[in-house]
Image (cartoon, rainbow, N blue to C red):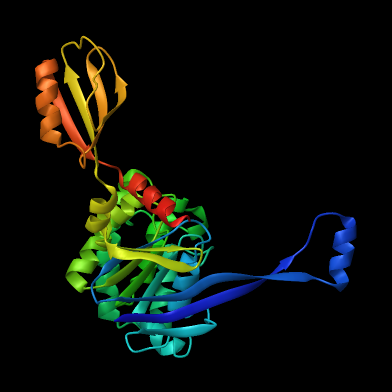
Amino acid sequence: MIKIEGLSKSFKVAKRSSGLANSLKALFYREHTIVQALNDISFSIEPGEIVGYIGPNGAGKSTTIKVMSGILVPDSGKCTIMGYTPWKERVSYVKNIGVVFGQRSQLWWDVPVMDSFELLRDIYKIPLQEYKANVELLVETLQLQNLISTPVRQLSLGQRMRCEIAASLLHSPSVLFLDEPTIGLDALSKIAVRNFIKTINKEKGVTVILTTHDMNDIEALADRVILIGKGSLLYDGKLNELRKKFGATKMMTVDYREASGPFDLYGVTVLSQTSDRAVLSVDTEKIMVSEVISILSGMVEILDLSIDSQPIEEIIIQLYKEYQV
């Protein structure tokens, strides 16, 4: 489905110091620096996968998506998607993909959303029956009933993003590129968008490449993550394997009647403790959770206890630190 080999892309960026003298100098002579956005990137994605493409700001995520969608031409390397080279066969290729950029709009600003949908139907030459079925599905699942008659400029950011996602799927693409798709969405809208992405992936087999800084999106949708940093591929693997590698810590919240003193257990860090509650961080590589519970039961009368895995954001931060990005 998607195969990328040795992809590289650099940009020439002008340099100029502040001040009037430097501004005048820049009129006649301008210094430049080369920024390596992508450096020998290689990976492949199978049909029907949902892949989280993550990394810090400036890592090269959006550049990769733009190359894969045919907007940018790389300096070197190969990119084959569904048998197409995106930047060489753009007209034929774009009929098979959907793209959502969180900071860009494909909807016409001053007309109602439905008019934009109609224009997109003409651009993509979508058969009428397929178009009507898709609009009905998208309006219902993304809860657009009260939005499609409203001009785009009058929508909030979250409302517009839901309409953008719908617009990118009107022509039934096989591959969907999502660059920060939940930016500006409230909690309910995020859940609706996530459920919708799961639905089209399961029922229609749409391959999804998700770029986001919201790690909850990654955890809710992706089984596999690809980490990029400073233009280089740093990690490519399953999310649960990432948890096993970096998620050895469990968070334990214990409610009890009264403790006579602070807890001091090997492999356990007390994050907070009061007379009736303690929040503990348990390193499961040093001590099992069951052992901690057993020891605590001998020290206090436990009223309630909850155990949570380490938040995905903390695991990703650890990954960034390991690769120094």
Q: Is residue 107 visible?
A: no
Q: Position of residue 47 (x, y in %)?
A: 24, 77
In this rendered view, identify the residue nearer to me: 263 or 100: 263
Vertically, is 42 above or below 167? below
Residue visible at 85% across and 61% down? 23
With 15 as the anchor, is 184 left or right in this view? left
Quadrant of the snapshot with the N terminus: bottom left
Q: Position of residue 284 (x, y in %)?
A: 20, 40
Q: Quadrant of residue 135?
A: bottom left
Residue visible at 26% across and 47% down? 247
In this rendered view, identify the residue nearer to me: 251 or 166: 251
Q: Quadrant of residue 310?
A: top left
With 88 as the anchor, is 237 left or right in this view? left
- The number of callouts visible is 0
In this rendered view, identify the residue nearer to me: 169 or 290: 290
With 139 as the anchor, is 60 left or right in this view? right
Vertically, is 37 above or below 297? below
Q: Position of residue 190 (x, y in %)?
A: 33, 50
Q: Position of residue 156 (x, y in %)?
A: 46, 50
Q: Is residue 203 visible?
A: yes
In this rendered view, identify the residue nearer to me: 115 or 34: 34
With 112 as the anchor, is 279 left or right in this view? left
Residue visible at 53% across and 78% down? 72
Residue visible at 36% across and 46% down? 313
